[in-house]
Amino acid sequence: MSDAALADTPIVTRDHARKFFSDCRAIIIAAPDRRQGWLDCAQAAARKVRSKEFGRAYAAEELREIIRQQGLFPDNSEDEIQAALVEIFEGTEPQKSNGHVIEEPPPAASPNEFGTSTAVVPYASAATEPAPLITPAQWPPEAPPAVEWLADGRVPRGDVTTLHGDGGAGKTDLAIQLAAGCARGASYWLGHEITTGRVVFISAEEPEREIRRRIWLHSQRDGYTLESLTNLQLWFPGEAGDAVMAVPDYHTGIMRPTPLFLSIAAAILAAGPVLVVGDNVAATFAGSQNDRVMVRSFVNLWRRIARGPSRPAVLLLDHPSLSGLTSGTGRGGNMDWRNAVRSALYLRTPDDKAEADRGIRILETAKSNYGPPGNPLRLQWADGGLAPEHAPSSLHRLAKDAECNETFLRLLDERNSQGRPVSDKAGRNYAPAIFAEMDGANGYNRTAFARSMERLFHIRKLAMQVRRIDGHDRQCINRAADEPAVAE
């Protein structure tokens, strides 16, 4: 639509008008009934015409063009289109006097109507079911459960985290690394311990060939095969490229899920993942970035996913607004992109241009409900993507894991030789907790030994054995039958 068509629209609202009709097109494309979607948008446009936000001629031309593009009327009959527009703009238009809209209520039937001082407005009836309320006395008299982390200290499970960063900063690269790490059973992501399991990655922006290229580079750098990624499940848009997950209801401003979102939500429920990645907000959100209701209701759609049976972490990738870039906060659009989530990460370039030119990036926690913000981590682009600056090589990590495995086996032999067996179950005889407190633990903690125990069971270096302890048969950890003890 040319700028000339905007001549009857106030200058201060022209950008808003363009955005409004751009959103309308997205809504109509995604709507199950496109003609009803057009009618809803047309009624919203008529209200804006009556409030003098848009010019009528401009709005009518936009609506007419949408009808023609979408083929919403048989044969695109000009008479039928014109009749529909007249009904929209004139059928429900308030009465006018001297060219001015009269916003006048119908006559009052009694003095208590329409806000007089004696009026009483009932806010609930006897039939209204009261909302359930609780008191802290109902809580168990014990410490609440600890925060469940997907990536320790950065990404919590059971809620939504946003990762903001300018285009080309490396958001998708970091998200792929996290997704692949969780899926293949890696221990760490950028030095943070991670939970492993299935992952659903929604690539609404990057095509399949690009994601494939990046995963291949990561696998070559980190020493894993594509066959190890059976737990990573990817979604890409079809040929039409439609990836809109939610559209606004212009009557309420609340974002409504599209059929595509509902289909993906069903796939997530069936997969039971520990992580869901949405790449990115710009490609899936058809509302206004600056509308608080739209932003918060969109985040809440994803929060319902996060509160599902598998309690996945939901990571949404987003571009910061111009003000977010200049202020250094990384915030995108309205404040509710930050306020509506429990955790927000920001990937940025350093202020030093020389550092930025050699590929340095800084990942920091912009918001966390479970700890202090900040904690900057310096990363650098290298072969295979972003990695911690001066990070140890994959060979070094393998060597450390092997050392921890040997330490675990040596401490296990020591306990068994003393007749003090240990268990793989949490409790007073839990092997990782006991080994972490022993002399000779070599600095490894309970978490490191727990991961070592899982590795050793996986490669069949350990086996469970029934022992008679205090008159009861107990399952205890022992070396596998063909595994020799470590010589002292």
Image (spheres, rainbow, N blue to C red):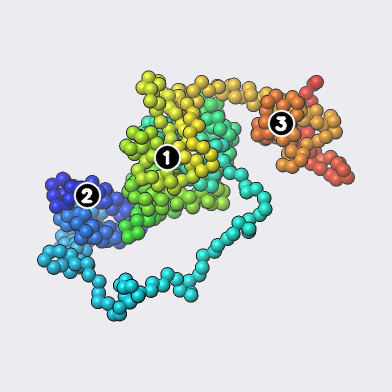
Q: Which residue bears the numbered disc 1?
A: 317
Task: Give percent across and percent down for residue 205.
Answer: 38, 39
196 vs 213: above or below:
below
Q: Which residue bears the numbered disc 3?
A: 436
In-image side of 210 versus 342 (left or right) = left
Residue sitting farthest toward the bottom: 109
Q: Earlier in the sequence, mark 3 or mark 1?
A: 1
x 65%, y 48%: residue: 143
Q: Which residue bears the numbered disc 2?
A: 13
Q: Earlier in the sequence, mark 1 or mark 2?
A: 2
Between label 1 and label 2, give the one nearer the viewer: 2
Nearer to us in this view, 336 or 217: 336
Q: How many marks?
A: 3
x 17%, y 51%: residue: 9
Nearer to us in this view, 149 or 68: 149
Nearer to us in this view, 70 or 313: 313
How packed is label 3: few (under 14 Cα within 10 Å), some, or many (20 or more)? Answer: many
Q: Secondary structure at mark 3?
A: helix
